[in-house]
Image: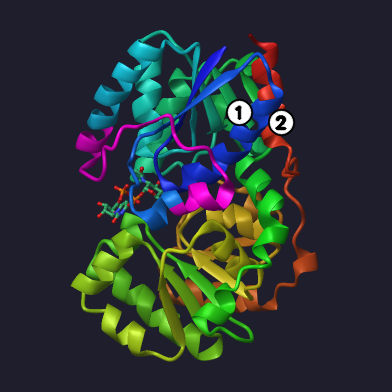
Amino acid sequence: MKIINVVGARPNFMKIAPLMRAYQDAPSIVPMLIHTGQHYDHAMSKAFFDDLGIPRPDINLEVGSGSHARQTADVMVRFEEVCLEHKPDCVLVVGDVNSTIACGMVAAKLGIRLVHVEAGLRSFDRRMPEEINRVLTDSISDLLFVTERSGLENLAREGVASERVHFVGNVMIDTLLANRARAQESDVLSRLGVTGDYGVVTLHRPSNVDTRDSLSRIVEVLAELAEKVPLVWPVHPRTKQRLTSFGLLGELEASPRFVLTAGLGYLDFLKLTSSARLILTDSGGVQEESAVLKVPCVTLRENTERPVTCEVGANRLVGSDPAAIREGCAWALGVKASDIADPELWDGKAATRIVEILSSTT
Ligand code: UD1
Protein backbone atom coordinates (compact mmCIF):
# COMPACT_ATOMS: atom_id res chain seq x y z
CA MET A 1 0.00 0.00 0.00
CA LYS A 2 1.49 3.30 -1.08
CA ILE A 3 0.63 6.11 1.36
CA ILE A 4 1.35 9.76 0.62
CA ASN A 5 1.82 11.61 3.91
CA VAL A 6 1.31 15.36 3.84
CA VAL A 7 2.93 18.08 5.94
CA GLY A 8 2.75 21.81 5.38
CA ALA A 9 2.99 23.96 8.49
CA ARG A 10 4.95 23.85 11.72
CA PRO A 11 2.44 21.93 13.88
CA ASN A 12 2.29 19.15 11.27
CA PHE A 13 5.93 18.16 11.61
CA MET A 14 5.75 16.75 15.15
CA LYS A 15 2.60 14.83 14.17
CA ILE A 16 4.14 13.11 11.15
CA ALA A 17 7.50 12.23 12.78
CA PRO A 18 6.28 9.21 14.82
CA LEU A 19 4.24 7.90 11.88
CA MET A 20 7.26 7.95 9.55
CA ARG A 21 9.13 5.97 12.20
CA ALA A 22 6.29 3.49 12.79
CA TYR A 23 6.03 2.72 9.05
CA GLN A 24 9.49 1.14 9.28
CA ASP A 25 7.89 -1.81 11.11
CA ALA A 26 5.10 -2.17 8.54
CA PRO A 27 6.45 -3.99 5.48
CA SER A 28 3.13 -3.75 3.62
CA ILE A 29 3.28 0.06 3.62
CA VAL A 30 5.36 2.17 1.24
CA PRO A 31 5.32 5.72 2.59
CA MET A 32 6.03 8.92 0.68
CA LEU A 33 6.38 12.31 2.36
CA ILE A 34 5.16 15.50 0.67
CA HIS A 35 5.84 18.98 2.07
CA THR A 36 3.49 21.61 0.67
CA GLY A 37 5.87 24.43 1.62
CA GLN A 38 3.15 26.38 3.48
CA HIS A 39 5.84 27.09 6.07
CA TYR A 40 9.25 27.58 4.54
CA ASP A 41 11.54 29.57 6.91
CA HIS A 42 14.32 27.47 8.39
CA ALA A 43 13.01 28.16 11.90
CA MET A 44 9.43 27.21 10.94
CA SER A 45 10.27 24.10 8.96
CA LYS A 46 13.76 22.62 8.37
CA ALA A 47 14.74 23.04 12.03
CA PHE A 48 11.95 20.58 12.95
CA PHE A 49 13.02 18.01 10.37
CA ASP A 50 16.52 18.15 11.85
CA ASP A 51 15.43 18.02 15.51
CA LEU A 52 12.95 15.20 14.96
CA GLY A 53 14.90 13.13 12.43
CA ILE A 54 12.08 13.32 9.87
CA PRO A 55 13.23 12.03 6.49
CA ARG A 56 13.69 14.61 3.75
CA PRO A 57 10.38 15.09 1.91
CA ASP A 58 10.22 13.21 -1.39
CA ILE A 59 8.63 16.29 -2.94
CA ASN A 60 8.26 19.92 -1.83
CA LEU A 61 5.40 21.80 -3.50
CA GLU A 62 6.88 25.17 -2.42
CA VAL A 63 3.58 27.04 -2.24
CA GLY A 64 4.68 29.59 0.39
CA SER A 65 2.42 32.24 1.95
CA GLY A 66 -0.66 33.84 0.43
CA SER A 67 -4.33 34.52 1.07
CA HIS A 68 -6.29 31.48 2.21
CA ALA A 69 -7.79 30.98 -1.25
CA ARG A 70 -4.49 31.32 -3.09
CA GLN A 71 -2.54 29.12 -0.67
CA THR A 72 -5.21 26.41 -0.68
CA ALA A 73 -5.63 26.55 -4.45
CA ASP A 74 -1.88 26.42 -5.13
CA VAL A 75 -1.52 23.35 -2.91
CA MET A 76 -4.45 21.67 -4.67
CA VAL A 77 -3.14 22.25 -8.19
CA ARG A 78 0.35 21.03 -7.36
CA PHE A 79 -0.77 18.12 -5.17
CA GLU A 80 -3.16 16.84 -7.83
CA GLU A 81 -0.21 16.44 -10.21
CA VAL A 82 1.69 14.46 -7.56
CA CYS A 83 -1.25 12.12 -7.00
CA LEU A 84 -1.78 11.58 -10.70
CA GLU A 85 1.88 10.74 -11.17
CA HIS A 86 2.44 8.57 -8.10
CA LYS A 87 -1.00 6.94 -7.85
CA PRO A 88 -1.09 6.38 -4.07
CA ASP A 89 -3.59 3.98 -2.49
CA CYS A 90 -4.04 6.35 0.36
CA VAL A 91 -3.38 9.99 1.36
CA LEU A 92 -2.79 10.74 5.03
CA VAL A 93 -3.23 14.29 6.35
CA VAL A 94 -2.73 15.59 9.89
CA GLY A 95 -4.18 18.48 11.89
CA ASP A 96 -6.16 21.42 10.61
CA VAL A 97 -4.01 23.75 8.50
CA ASN A 98 -4.76 24.89 4.96
CA SER A 99 -2.51 22.17 3.54
CA THR A 100 -4.64 19.54 5.34
CA ILE A 101 -7.91 20.44 3.62
CA ALA A 102 -6.25 21.25 0.29
CA CYS A 103 -4.65 17.80 -0.05
CA GLY A 104 -7.70 16.13 1.48
CA MET A 105 -9.97 17.57 -1.20
CA VAL A 106 -7.62 16.51 -3.99
CA ALA A 107 -7.49 12.93 -2.67
CA ALA A 108 -11.25 12.67 -2.15
CA LYS A 109 -12.02 13.92 -5.66
CA LEU A 110 -9.53 11.51 -7.24
CA GLY A 111 -11.17 8.66 -5.33
CA ILE A 112 -8.06 8.03 -3.23
CA ARG A 113 -8.69 6.80 0.32
CA LEU A 114 -8.25 9.71 2.72
CA VAL A 115 -6.97 9.27 6.27
CA HIS A 116 -7.20 12.12 8.80
CA VAL A 117 -5.03 12.02 11.90
CA GLU A 118 -6.28 14.29 14.72
CA ALA A 119 -9.88 14.11 13.51
CA GLY A 120 -13.00 15.15 15.39
CA LEU A 121 -11.71 18.19 17.28
CA ARG A 122 -14.23 21.05 17.30
CA SER A 123 -14.01 24.57 18.73
CA PHE A 124 -17.52 25.30 17.37
CA ASP A 125 -16.12 28.66 16.26
CA ARG A 126 -16.43 29.01 12.51
CA ARG A 127 -14.47 32.27 12.58
CA MET A 128 -11.31 30.17 12.98
CA PRO A 129 -9.94 29.03 9.62
CA GLU A 130 -8.78 25.82 11.33
CA GLU A 131 -12.36 24.95 12.34
CA ILE A 132 -13.50 25.13 8.73
CA ASN A 133 -10.52 22.97 7.74
CA ARG A 134 -11.37 20.39 10.44
CA VAL A 135 -15.06 20.09 9.65
CA LEU A 136 -14.47 19.81 5.91
CA THR A 137 -11.56 17.36 6.16
CA ASP A 138 -13.49 15.05 8.49
CA SER A 139 -16.54 15.12 6.24
CA ILE A 140 -14.58 13.69 3.29
CA SER A 141 -12.23 11.31 5.16
CA ASP A 142 -12.55 7.54 4.91
CA LEU A 143 -10.60 6.74 8.07
CA LEU A 144 -10.50 9.08 11.07
CA PHE A 145 -8.06 8.87 13.98
CA VAL A 146 -9.10 10.70 17.13
CA THR A 147 -6.98 12.04 20.00
CA GLU A 148 -9.60 12.43 22.74
CA ARG A 149 -13.13 11.27 23.54
CA SER A 150 -14.74 14.59 22.59
CA GLY A 151 -13.69 13.78 19.01
CA LEU A 152 -15.72 10.56 19.07
CA GLU A 153 -18.80 12.44 20.24
CA ASN A 154 -18.37 15.21 17.67
CA LEU A 155 -18.00 12.79 14.77
CA ALA A 156 -20.96 10.68 15.91
CA ARG A 157 -23.10 13.83 16.09
CA GLU A 158 -22.04 14.72 12.55
CA GLY A 159 -23.13 11.29 11.32
CA VAL A 160 -19.69 9.75 10.64
CA ALA A 161 -20.02 5.95 10.72
CA SER A 162 -18.35 4.64 13.88
CA GLU A 163 -16.47 1.86 12.04
CA ARG A 164 -14.43 4.55 10.27
CA VAL A 165 -13.38 6.22 13.54
CA HIS A 166 -10.62 5.07 15.91
CA PHE A 167 -9.61 6.61 19.25
CA VAL A 168 -5.83 6.07 19.21
CA GLY A 169 -4.26 8.82 21.36
CA ASN A 170 -2.13 11.71 20.24
CA VAL A 171 0.77 11.50 17.78
CA MET A 172 2.04 14.91 18.88
CA ILE A 173 2.41 13.52 22.38
CA ASP A 174 4.27 10.50 20.97
CA THR A 175 6.86 13.01 19.78
CA LEU A 176 6.95 14.85 23.08
CA LEU A 177 7.49 11.69 25.11
CA ALA A 178 10.12 10.37 22.68
CA ASN A 179 12.12 13.60 22.91
CA ARG A 180 11.60 14.70 26.48
CA ALA A 181 14.85 13.34 27.86
CA ARG A 182 16.87 14.62 24.88
CA ALA A 183 15.34 18.07 25.27
CA GLN A 184 16.72 18.32 28.81
CA GLU A 185 20.18 18.63 27.25
CA SER A 186 19.21 21.81 25.42
CA ASP A 187 21.12 24.89 26.56
CA VAL A 188 18.25 27.21 25.62
CA LEU A 189 17.84 28.65 29.12
CA SER A 190 21.44 29.76 29.41
CA ARG A 191 21.45 31.00 25.80
CA LEU A 192 18.47 33.20 26.58
CA GLY A 193 19.87 34.19 29.97
CA VAL A 194 16.86 32.81 31.86
CA THR A 195 17.22 31.83 35.52
CA GLY A 196 14.66 31.14 38.23
CA ASP A 197 10.89 31.06 37.70
CA TYR A 198 9.54 32.20 34.36
CA GLY A 199 6.47 31.97 32.16
CA VAL A 200 6.32 31.18 28.42
CA VAL A 201 4.15 33.10 25.95
CA THR A 202 3.16 32.06 22.42
CA LEU A 203 0.60 33.96 20.34
CA HIS A 204 -0.27 33.77 16.66
CA ARG A 205 -4.07 33.57 16.23
CA PRO A 206 -5.33 36.28 13.87
CA SER A 207 -8.10 37.12 16.38
CA ASN A 208 -5.46 38.01 19.01
CA VAL A 209 -2.64 39.49 16.98
CA ASP A 210 -4.12 41.01 13.85
CA THR A 211 -5.76 44.10 15.40
CA ARG A 212 -3.97 46.84 17.29
CA ASP A 213 -6.71 46.93 19.90
CA SER A 214 -6.54 43.29 20.87
CA LEU A 215 -2.75 42.90 20.64
CA SER A 216 -2.03 46.03 22.70
CA ARG A 217 -4.54 44.97 25.37
CA ILE A 218 -2.83 41.60 25.64
CA VAL A 219 0.65 43.14 25.75
CA GLU A 220 -0.46 45.44 28.56
CA VAL A 221 -1.67 42.64 30.78
CA LEU A 222 1.40 40.53 29.96
CA ALA A 223 3.54 43.44 31.13
CA GLU A 224 1.70 43.39 34.47
CA LEU A 225 2.25 39.64 34.86
CA ALA A 226 5.90 40.02 33.88
CA GLU A 227 6.43 42.15 36.99
CA LYS A 228 5.71 38.97 39.01
CA VAL A 229 7.27 36.33 36.73
CA PRO A 230 9.54 37.17 33.81
CA LEU A 231 8.14 36.05 30.47
CA VAL A 232 9.96 34.29 27.64
CA TRP A 233 8.23 34.82 24.30
CA PRO A 234 9.28 33.01 21.11
CA VAL A 235 7.60 35.26 18.56
CA HIS A 236 5.79 33.78 15.51
CA PRO A 237 6.54 35.59 12.21
CA ARG A 238 2.92 36.78 11.90
CA THR A 239 3.03 38.23 15.43
CA LYS A 240 6.41 39.84 14.85
CA GLN A 241 5.00 41.68 11.84
CA ARG A 242 2.02 42.91 13.86
CA LEU A 243 4.04 43.94 16.94
CA THR A 244 6.29 45.93 14.64
CA SER A 245 3.54 47.63 12.67
CA PHE A 246 1.55 48.52 15.82
CA GLY A 247 4.69 50.03 17.41
CA LEU A 248 4.70 47.56 20.32
CA LEU A 249 7.92 45.67 19.68
CA GLY A 250 10.41 48.31 20.92
CA GLU A 251 8.87 48.56 24.38
CA LEU A 252 8.84 44.78 24.82
CA GLU A 253 12.43 44.41 23.63
CA ALA A 254 13.55 47.13 26.02
CA SER A 255 11.87 45.57 29.06
CA PRO A 256 14.15 43.55 31.36
CA ARG A 257 11.11 41.44 32.32
CA PHE A 258 10.62 40.03 28.80
CA VAL A 259 12.90 37.76 26.81
CA LEU A 260 11.84 37.91 23.17
CA THR A 261 13.30 35.41 20.76
CA ALA A 262 12.63 34.20 17.25
CA GLY A 263 10.75 30.92 16.93
CA LEU A 264 12.65 28.08 18.62
CA GLY A 265 13.41 24.58 17.41
CA TYR A 266 11.48 21.64 18.85
CA LEU A 267 13.97 20.54 21.51
CA ASP A 268 14.67 24.08 22.72
CA PHE A 269 10.96 24.85 22.98
CA LEU A 270 10.28 21.60 24.83
CA LYS A 271 13.02 22.35 27.32
CA LEU A 272 11.65 25.88 27.76
CA THR A 273 8.05 24.81 28.36
CA SER A 274 8.86 21.80 30.51
CA SER A 275 10.76 23.96 33.01
CA ALA A 276 8.25 26.85 33.01
CA ARG A 277 6.04 27.94 35.91
CA LEU A 278 3.13 28.66 33.55
CA ILE A 279 2.34 28.96 29.85
CA LEU A 280 0.19 31.59 28.13
CA THR A 281 -0.81 30.63 24.62
CA ASP A 282 -3.40 30.65 21.87
CA SER A 283 -1.94 27.56 20.18
CA GLY A 284 -3.82 24.26 20.10
CA GLY A 285 -0.77 22.03 20.33
CA VAL A 286 0.83 23.92 23.22
CA GLN A 287 -2.32 23.38 25.30
CA GLU A 288 -1.91 19.63 24.77
CA GLU A 289 1.82 19.63 25.52
CA SER A 290 1.28 21.57 28.72
CA ALA A 291 -1.12 18.90 29.98
CA VAL A 292 1.50 16.17 29.56
CA LEU A 293 4.30 18.34 30.96
CA LYS A 294 1.99 19.21 33.88
CA VAL A 295 2.69 22.90 33.50
CA PRO A 296 -0.51 24.96 33.89
CA CYS A 297 -1.69 26.67 30.73
CA VAL A 298 -3.69 29.90 30.39
CA THR A 299 -5.29 29.92 26.95
CA LEU A 300 -6.02 33.29 25.37
CA ARG A 301 -9.07 32.03 23.50
CA GLU A 302 -12.79 31.85 24.22
CA ASN A 303 -12.97 28.18 23.29
CA THR A 304 -10.83 25.13 22.75
CA GLU A 305 -11.19 22.20 20.40
CA ARG A 306 -9.15 20.22 22.93
CA PRO A 307 -11.42 20.15 26.02
CA VAL A 308 -9.58 17.23 27.61
CA THR A 309 -6.78 19.67 28.53
CA CYS A 310 -9.26 21.55 30.75
CA GLU A 311 -10.82 18.36 32.11
CA VAL A 312 -7.46 17.06 33.39
CA GLY A 313 -6.89 20.35 35.22
CA ALA A 314 -4.09 21.70 33.01
CA ASN A 315 -5.81 24.48 31.11
CA ARG A 316 -8.04 27.54 31.65
CA LEU A 317 -9.70 29.49 28.83
CA VAL A 318 -9.54 33.25 29.40
CA GLY A 319 -10.14 34.89 26.01
CA SER A 320 -8.48 38.28 25.63
CA ASP A 321 -10.18 40.14 28.48
CA PRO A 322 -7.50 41.55 30.82
CA ALA A 323 -9.41 40.73 34.04
CA ALA A 324 -9.90 37.11 32.93
CA ILE A 325 -6.23 36.81 31.91
CA ARG A 326 -5.18 38.12 35.34
CA GLU A 327 -7.46 35.64 37.07
CA GLY A 328 -6.19 32.80 34.88
CA CYS A 329 -2.59 33.62 35.76
CA ALA A 330 -3.41 33.71 39.48
CA TRP A 331 -4.99 30.23 39.09
CA ALA A 332 -1.96 28.93 37.17
CA LEU A 333 0.53 30.19 39.75
CA GLY A 334 -1.33 28.14 42.38
CA VAL A 335 -1.43 24.85 40.42
CA LYS A 336 0.92 21.99 41.34
CA ALA A 337 2.00 19.30 38.86
CA SER A 338 0.23 16.69 40.98
CA ASP A 339 -3.10 18.54 40.41
CA ILE A 340 -2.97 17.62 36.71
CA ALA A 341 -4.12 14.16 35.53
CA ASP A 342 -2.96 12.29 32.40
CA PRO A 343 -5.22 12.48 29.33
CA GLU A 344 -6.44 9.02 28.30
CA LEU A 345 -4.20 7.15 25.79
CA TRP A 346 -1.63 9.95 25.53
CA ASP A 347 0.99 7.33 26.20
CA GLY A 348 3.43 7.60 23.30
CA LYS A 349 1.88 4.76 21.26
CA ALA A 350 -0.62 6.55 19.01
CA ALA A 351 1.44 6.18 15.82
CA THR A 352 1.93 2.45 16.44
CA ARG A 353 -1.84 2.02 16.83
CA ILE A 354 -2.50 3.99 13.65
CA VAL A 355 -0.01 2.02 11.59
CA GLU A 356 -1.41 -1.30 12.90
CA ILE A 357 -4.90 -0.26 11.82
CA LEU A 358 -3.66 0.95 8.43
CA SER A 359 -1.74 -2.32 7.88
CA SER A 360 -4.77 -4.42 8.79
CA THR A 361 -6.93 -2.61 6.24
CA THR A 362 -4.70 -3.26 3.22
C1 UD1 B 1 -0.66 28.36 10.21
C2 UD1 B 1 -1.96 27.56 10.41
C3 UD1 B 1 -2.30 27.50 11.91
C4 UD1 B 1 -1.12 26.97 12.71
C5 UD1 B 1 0.09 27.87 12.43
C6 UD1 B 1 1.32 27.47 13.19
C7 UD1 B 1 -3.65 27.73 8.63
C8 UD1 B 1 -4.95 28.33 8.28
N1 UD1 B 1 -3.08 28.20 9.77
O1 UD1 B 1 -0.90 29.69 10.62
O2 UD1 B 1 -3.40 26.64 12.09
O3 UD1 B 1 -1.44 26.99 14.07
O4 UD1 B 1 0.36 27.78 11.02
O5 UD1 B 1 2.36 28.35 12.88
O6 UD1 B 1 -3.17 26.87 7.94
N2 UD1 B 1 5.47 33.26 7.54
C9 UD1 B 1 6.84 33.39 7.53
N3 UD1 B 1 7.58 32.25 7.39
C10 UD1 B 1 7.03 31.02 7.25
C11 UD1 B 1 5.62 30.91 7.24
C12 UD1 B 1 4.86 32.03 7.39
O7 UD1 B 1 7.38 34.45 7.67
O8 UD1 B 1 7.77 30.02 7.13
C13 UD1 B 1 4.65 34.48 7.71
C14 UD1 B 1 4.13 34.99 6.38
O9 UD1 B 1 4.15 36.37 6.40
C15 UD1 B 1 2.69 34.52 6.36
C16 UD1 B 1 2.33 34.51 7.84
O10 UD1 B 1 3.53 34.16 8.53
O11 UD1 B 1 1.88 35.33 5.60
C17 UD1 B 1 1.26 33.53 8.18
O12 UD1 B 1 1.59 32.22 7.69
P1 UD1 B 1 0.41 31.19 7.30
O13 UD1 B 1 0.97 29.88 6.89
O14 UD1 B 1 -0.56 31.83 6.38
O15 UD1 B 1 -0.39 31.02 8.66
P2 UD1 B 1 0.07 30.88 10.18
O16 UD1 B 1 -0.36 32.09 10.90
O17 UD1 B 1 1.48 30.45 10.32
Amino acid carrying label 1: it is Phe
Q: Regarding mark 2 in the picture, which secondary structure is present there? A: helix
Q: In this view, does 310 lie to the left or right of 160?
A: right
> Looking at the rendered structure, which numbered label has been put on residue 352?
2
Q: In which quarter of the image is the N terminus?
A: top right
Q: In this orientation, does residue 305 appear?
A: no
Q: Quadrant of the C terminus?
A: top right
**In front here: 176 or 49?**
49
Q: Regarding mark 1 in the picture, which secondary structure is present there? A: strand
Residue 108 vertical placement versus 25 (above, below): above
Residue 100 vertical placement versus 123 (above, below): above
At a point 52% along the width and 37% down the height, the residue shown is 55
Residue 239: which quarter of the image?
bottom left
**In front here: 1 or 287?**
1
| Crowdedness near tag 2: few (<14), some (14–19) or many (≥20) residues, C-alpha within 10 Å | many
The residue segment tinted magenta is 47-72
Q: Which of marks 1 and 2 is in front?
A: 2
At a point 25% along the width and 37% down the height, the residue shown is 71
Q: Residue furthest right?
A: 338
Labels 1 & 2 near each other (Cβ < 8 A): no
Q: Mark 1 and mark 2: span between their CA atoms?
A: 12 Å
Q: Which of marks 1 and 2 is nearer the N terminus?
A: 1
**Is 316 a magenta residue?**
no
Instruction: Determine which residue is flagged by label 1.
Output: 145
At a point 65% along the width and 62% down the height, the residue shown is 183
Residue 160 vertical placement versus 147 (above, below): above
**Is 54 a magenta residue?**
yes
Q: Position of residue 276 (x, y in %)?
A: 62, 73
**In front here: 252 or 74?**
74
Q: Where is residue 273 in the image (x, y as percent from the top left)?
A: 60, 67
